[in-house]
Amino acid sequence: MSRKRKVLLIVAGAVVALFIILLILAKLLITEERVRNTLLPVAEGALSRKVTLGPVDISLFTGISINDLVVRNRDDSADFISSEKLVLRYSLLSLLMFRVDIDEFSLIKPKVEIIRNRDGSFNFSDLVESSDDISRGEGDGNLNEASSIDLQIDSVGIRDGELLFIDKTAEGKPVRHRISKFNLQSEKISPRNIFPVEMNADWNGSRLALKGTVDPGKPGVDLSASFNKLNFQVVGGFQDEKIKANLKLPKTSFKDIRSSIPKDYSPFEGASAQKGHVTLDIDLHDDVV
C-alpha cells in the first residue's frame, strides 16, 4: 500500500472517529433536561408568563420536537397559548456555513385564547408594550444584526388550530368568537422573497379560506379570499406608514350575500328578501393604527 493511500485512510478514520465522538458528546450533553432547564427560564423571562413543556425529542442533526407546549396567561388564570406539538427541523450543514435554513416549522393543534377586558386592554397588552420598548431602542441593541441573518424556511404549517376571542366589553355576557379547524401552509419563506400562502378555517360555523402570495419586501399581499359564498380579491400592503390596498367583490347576488353572513351579525335579519346583484371595488388608503 502506498504512503499516500495510508495517509488518506488515516485521515478518513480520524474523521469517522471524530464524528462518532461528536455523536456521543451530543447524546451526553444535549439532553432533554438540559434543553428544558435552558429554554424555560428564557421563555418565561421574555413572556412574563409561566411556560410548561411535555416530552422533548432532540436530534443534533435534524432538529427538535416539543410536545404539550403551554403558555399561561399572565395572571395564571388560563392557558394563553398551547400546542399539542411543535416541530423545528433545520439543516446542520447550512448552520456550519453561517446560514439559517429551516426545513420545517410546524404547529400541531395549537390553541390561542385572546381576551379583551372590560377596560379595553387585552391579555397580551403587556407583550405589545414590551415590543414597542424594543422598537424604540429600549431593549436589546442587536436587532439590526438579527434582521440581517440569511434566513429561509422551506415549510411552515399549522394543522387543526383554534383561536378563541372573548370580548368582555360587550353589554351583558361576554361575546365569544371561535375560529376552529385552522390550517395554514406556506413554503420558501424568506424576508427578501415573495412566498405563497394558503389558509382555511371555520369561524363560528362559517367557512373562511384564502390563497395567494406575500411580499415581505413591500410589505404587501395578493390574495384571493372566500367567506361562505362570497369571494374577494385583496391586493396591497403598507407604504409610507399607510395602508394602501384594493378590495374587489365580483358580481354577487344579494341572495348569496344574505346566506353567507351569520345570523348573529346579519343586517338583513327581519328584512324582506332583496333581489339583484352587487359589485364592489374599494381603494383603501389610511394611516396605520
Image (cartoon, rainbow, N blue to C red):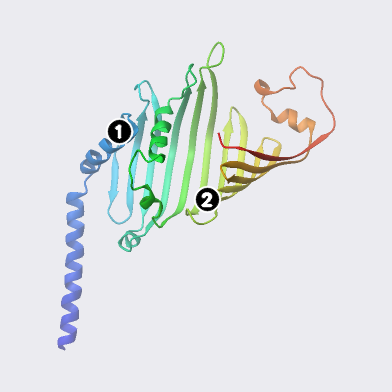
The residue wearing badge 1 is 44
Residue 4 appears anywhere in the view: yes
What numbered label is drawn on residue 173? none
Query: 141 and 16: which one is in front?
Result: 141
Q: Left or right of 259: which side holds 218?
A: left
Quadrant occupied by the C terminus? top right
Q: Which residue is drawn at the image coordinates 36% and 59% (left, top)?
A: 99
Which one is in front in this view, the residue at disc 1 or the one at disc 2?
2
Label count reads 2
Task: Determine whether, in the image, residue 55 is placed left or right of residue 7.
Answer: right
Q: Dividing the picture into quarters, in which one does residue 154 lie?
A: bottom left
Could you say where residue 175 lies in the image, as x and y percent from the top left?
55, 19
Residue 187, given in percent of the width and then of the height, sits at 50, 53
Q: Residue at (18%, 50%) from the top-left corner?
A: 29
**In the picture, residue 93 is in which quadrant?**
bottom left
- Residue in view at x 30 percent, y 62 percent: 96
The residue most toward the top is: 172
- Give the residue pinned by disc 2: 216
| Image location of residue 114, percent across then percent down | 47, 27
Residue 114 as seen in the image, left or right of residue 48: right
Camera-side residue of 16 and 222: 222
The kind of residue on which mark 2 rests is: Pro
Q: For mark 1, give the secondary structure.
A: helix
Depicted 78 relative to depicted 173: above or below: below
Q: Amino acid at mark 1?
A: Glu
Q: Determine whether the residue tagged by mark 2 lies in a helix, strand or loop.
A: loop
